Each structure stands twice: as structure tokens, then as C-alpha cells.
Image: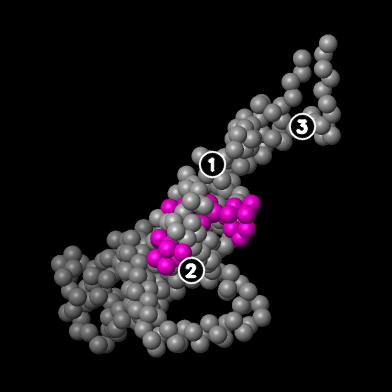
Amino acid sequence: MDVPELPTGKKRGALDPFRRAVLGGLAVLLPPLLTIVIFLWVGNTVTNYLLEPMESGARRLLVGHFQTWIHSSEDIPPAQIRDGQEENFTRPYQKTEDGQLVRSEMFDFVRGEINGPMPGNANEVVEVYVERKFLRRHIVIPIFLCVFLLVLYLLGKFLAAGMGRFFWMQIERVINRLPLVRNVYSSVKQVTDFLFTEREIEYTRVVAVEYPRKGIWTIAMVTGESLLDIRCAANEPVLSILVPTSPMPFTGFTVTVKKSETIDLNLTIDQAFQFIVSCGVVVPPQQMTQALADRERAGNNPALTSPSHE
């Protein structure tokens, strides 16, 4: 006798396989797409707010310098001005359409760089000369990176000193008094501190411990063997552990527990941090339960979960 299927309380629609396939494709596509979008956003932000203003300032300085190469015809003897003949190519000055004089090497460089007609006045010749010779991206970007790293180094050294640290604390005090800005600033500061601050605590391994009471398991990082007096009082080996808090694991509680009451986990430090930052959502593959593994395989292959019709 056939055993009737028990109702699950959830009706399967005709579009369920299509919906699961779309969600599976979206789950595969979103991580690399969002990664590319984030890097493009960072690149555009750096270009718009740092690189282009630096280029604009350098352009003004260079154009102002090379405009001193512009002279009027009355200031230069005719023997030093080219008249267009080949034998006069060694003369140092060239007349532009507005009657001004520029250096011959500048004029020849601009003429070799552009395909159309020459600029109509000497100032335009200077601007094209500066743009094409000094402000090409393969020249600007390495200089920008060197200057940016130098500024970061000097800023870091300044903030590490007593006066710089005091000055920055006063700025942060003002920021923390602004109603809306302080919320955004504190959140961003927590993320950047976690990403860029060097960890002074060296974690040896990841363990699980029943904390804050029996029956509640918490992931912790082993930092050492704690104090000798505590070891003697416990009459067995003890461990110093850091119990991090979610979603910012660089804060937490330092606890000393018995070594026998800890469980070594098959997790790397990075995987433990990902688990904590995601509030337990990101589970390493080697720690997934069979149900999670089956569900992930079903998500990658919708045919596994589609109802069979005999």
C-alpha cells in the first residue's frame, strides 16, 4: 500500500524552478559584480577628488612657468626668429598666428603631437605643450602614488607624535559632537580600524567555550596560557582567551578558562573573523552541517530540489 505524502503546508508553484535558477545565478553573479563596482567606485573617487585636483594644480604651475617663454616680436631680434625656411630651423623662436613668439622646440613638439591645425595663439601652444609632455597619465599616476604615499607617511609620523595625537583628538572631539556626522564617522572609523590597524595581540588558535554560561557556546581566540596563580588555583592548565563581539571583533572580553573546557575548532583566524563579522551567517565549508551542504548544492543545481512528477 502506498503511503500518502504528508502536506508540507507550502504549495509549489510552476515558477519555482525558474525562481530558484534566477536566484542561484544572482548569487553567483553578485559577489564578483559588487567587487568590481566597489573597486570602480574607489578608483573614480580617487580620480575625481585627488588625482584631477592635483593635475589641475600642476597644470596651472607649469603653464605659468612656460608662459615666460612667450615674447613679443619687438623684444627678439629678427635674426633669431624663424621665417619658415629650412635653413632657419635652428633659430630659437617661432611666431604664432597671433604674432607672439614661442620657443622653437615647444612649437615643433606641439606640431608633432597634434594632427589638425596649430593653436591660434601662443597661450594655447603652451597649454598643449604642458598637457602632452608633462601631464600624460603614465607620468602623472606614478608621481601621484609617490606623493600620496609620502603624505600618508608624514601624516602617520605626525599623528604618532604627542602633538599630532593631541591635535587629532581635538578634531575627533568636535566631530563626535555633531549629531548626524558622529554616527556615520563612528561606524566608518570602526571599519577602518579593523581593516588597517595592526593587531598587537597574536592569536594562536580558535576555540569554542561555554560562555557566558553553560549551554551557550562562543567562539574565542587563544592568546596565551594566562597567569600562574590562576593555573595553581584551578589545579590544571588554563588558557587566556579573547571573546570577540559581533560585528566588530577587535573589541571583546579577556577571559581565563580551563583548557579542558575548551574545544579546538577547525577554523583559521580569518575564517573565525568572517564568522564573527557576519554574525554567524558566513560558515566555513568544512564546518557546514549536512543540511547546509545539501541546501547549497540544491541552490547551485535547482533540478535537485524540483518536485518529481511520475
Question: Distance from label 1 to label 3 (Cα)?
Answer: 33 Å
Rendered view: 191 above or below 121? above
Give percent across and percent down for residue 99.
33, 79
Q: Circle 3 sits in a helix, a strand or a loop, which is it?
A: loop
Q: What residue is disc 2 on?
A: 193
Task: Give the mark nearer the N terminus: 1 vs 3.
Answer: 3
Q: What residue is disc 1 on?
A: 287
* Residue 224 on the magenta span: yes
Rendered view: 179 above or below 222? below
Give percent across and percent down for residue 120.
39, 72
- Residue 269 visible in image: no
In the displayed structure, does residue 279 sit left or right of residue 135? right
Q: Circle 2 sits in a helix, a strand or a loop, which is it?
A: helix
Question: Distance from label 2 to label 3 (Cα)?
Answer: 46 Å
The residue range painted magenta reads: 205-233
Task: Give the mark nearer the N terminus: 1 vs 2.
Answer: 2
Please give the name of the residue rendered at 64% of the width and 52% of the height, measured from the top-left corner: 215
Please give the name of the residue rendered at 75% of the width and 32% of the height, measured from the top-left corner: 16
Give percent across and percent down for residue 19.
72, 36
Q: What residue is disc 3 on?
A: 15
Q: Amino acid at mark 2?
A: Asp
Please rate how many residues cluster around mark 3, counting C-alpha atoms within 10 Å: few if below 14, some from 14 to 19, many from 20. few
Q: Between label 1 and label 2, give the one nearer the viewer.
A: 1
